[in-house]
Amino acid sequence: MLRLNQKPVLLKARVIRHSSVLREIMFKNIIVLLLLVWSTNAMAESEFYLKIDLLNREVSKDSNSQRYTVEVKNREVGYEFSYSGFPDNSKQLKERTLSGDELAEVIKYIKEQGINRSITEIKPTDANGPSRKVALSLLLKLDGQTTESKISGNYRIFRGDGKIKGAIIKNKKYVDDVESLVRDLN
């Protein structure tokens, strides 16, 4: 009878040892999983880079220009805005850090609006009247892909008589979406 009573005790000791080993393995797996998630998020942030240089010029009797330069490395934003023309010239410099949620919203906007596609459109800027001209340069590194876009030319020619001479860019929506992004990053 001693043998019968001893077997359950031995089995119980093995079960206790086995469950503590399982807990230790589960604990290590949880730590590895947390480290993996953290490093993946850190890599995603470190892979994000955006540089935008956008120049809007109005050619008219009240000619002026606005230049936006934005650079986002990971979550750090450098923003510069300059205005020249009537009534006076001005310049604005800002730096800030995006939160994780803000960066996620920026990336979502970029993808939803199709800003993460390369476009090249270079048109002449001659026009027979008042006009708005744009020059856009964009460099984006996102999800392991690099996007480069360059767009320049007349955005609009203002002629009341309808006799417009001069080419107008086709990618106005792309320019508008990038300009909206630039203003949101301010």
Image (cartoon, rainbow, N blue to C red):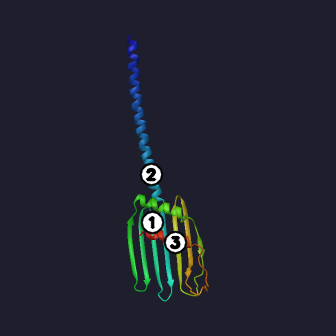
Query: At 39% from the left edge and 20% from the top edge, which residue is drawn?
Result: 10
Distance Cα–Cα, label 1 vs label 3:
19 Å
For marks 3 and 2, give the CA distance: 35 Å
Decide if residue 169 is on the left or right side of residue 100.
Answer: right
Locate the C terminus and report the quarter of the image it occupies. bottom left
For label 3, the crowd category at 10 Å Cα-Cα, with few meaning under 14, some 14 to 19 and many 20 or more, is few
Residue at disc 2, secondary structure: helix
Residue carrying label 3:
176
Q: Which residue is located at x 41 percent, y 32 percent? A: 21
Eye-nearest disc, 1 or 3: 3
The quarter in which the N terminus is drawn is top left
Q: Which mark is residue 72?
A: 1
SS at mark 1?
strand
Find residue 26 and report its horizontal and vertical position in percent.
42, 37
Query: Looking at numbered disc 2 in the image, what kind of residue is underneath it?
Result: Ser
**Residue flagged by tag 1: what amino acid is it?**
Val
Q: Which mark is residue 52?
A: none
For numbered disc 3, what is the local secondary structure?
A: helix
Q: Amino acid at mark 3?
A: Asp
Instruction: Write down the residue under mark 2.
Output: 39
Q: Residue 185: percent from the left, percent from the top? A: 43, 68
Q: Residue at x 61, y 80 (%)?
A: 167
Q: Residue furthest bottom?
A: 61
Q: Is residue 159 above or below residue 10?
A: below
Q: Earlier in the sequence, mark 1 or mark 3?
A: 1
How crowded is the residue under tag 2: few (<14 C-alpha within 10 Å), some, or many (20+)? Answer: few
Of mark 3 and mark 2, the one earlier in the sequence is 2
Work out whether residue 180 or residue 141 is closer to the camera in this orientation and state it: 180
Q: CA distance from mark 1 to mark 2?
A: 20 Å
